[in-house]
Amino acid sequence: MSKLEFLQHKIMTPDQAAHTVLGWKLKSARIGFTNGCFDLLHVGHMSTLIHTANHCDKVVVGLNSDASVRRLKGSSRPLVGQEQRALLMAGFLLVDAVVIFEEDTPLELIQLLQPDVLVKGGDWAEKDIVGAAQVRQTGGEVLIVPYLKGWSTTELADKMQQL
């Protein structure tokens, strides 16, 4: 298997991810989940991935589809297409699976995968984190990574437009 094929193997459909996660759980792995658009990767994203990996055995990243990003962020986004964003996320050693989802929120994916740990960036309050209640109901935990000021995709895109 080539290195590219290895990365592509980490990009899964929701059903493939559910099957893979079940296998990991049968081996007593603790499953972590985070999600986002991950449009322009930056240190804030890396901080979230590191925090997730520090609290679990396997990291699953839910990635908003291009259509979902457009609905959430506007017609000028995403800046990078979903296939490329998924491949970039799969390229991180810390990431074990990447799942593109079409909905505006990852709720259905979270309910399908039932992660043990749900991680979001510090720009979210727990009461606003989609899936937090469902993860807590199944005995999981919700973690919020401290926000790194100045490191959001929107801020970076705005800075680039000013150049």
Image: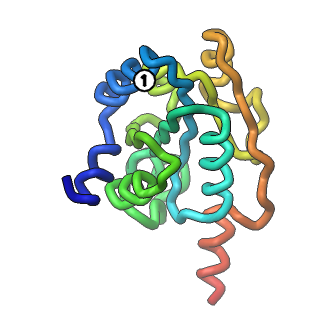
Q: Position of residue 88 (x, y in %)?
A: 42, 59
Amino acid at the residue labelled 1: Trp
Residue at 37% in and 20% down:
23
In the rendered image, which quarter is residue 20 located in? top left
Residue at 32% in and 52% down:
7
Figure check: 30 above or below 81: above
Quadrant in which the C terminus appears: bottom right
Q: Residues within 10 Å of mark 1 (few under 14, many from 20)?
A: some
Badge 1 marks a residue whose secondary structure is helix
Q: Position of residue 1 (x, y in %)?
A: 19, 52
The residue carrying mark 1 is 24
Figure check: 113 above or below 93: above
Residue at 45% in and 66% down:
79
Q: Position of residue 82 (x, y in %)?
A: 37, 54
Q: Position of residue 103 (x, y in %)?
A: 43, 35
Asked if residue 5 lies left or right of residue 103, the reply is left
Q: Is residue 107 visible?
A: yes
Q: Using the image as rendered, state which of residue 78 and residue 92 is in the foreground.
A: 92
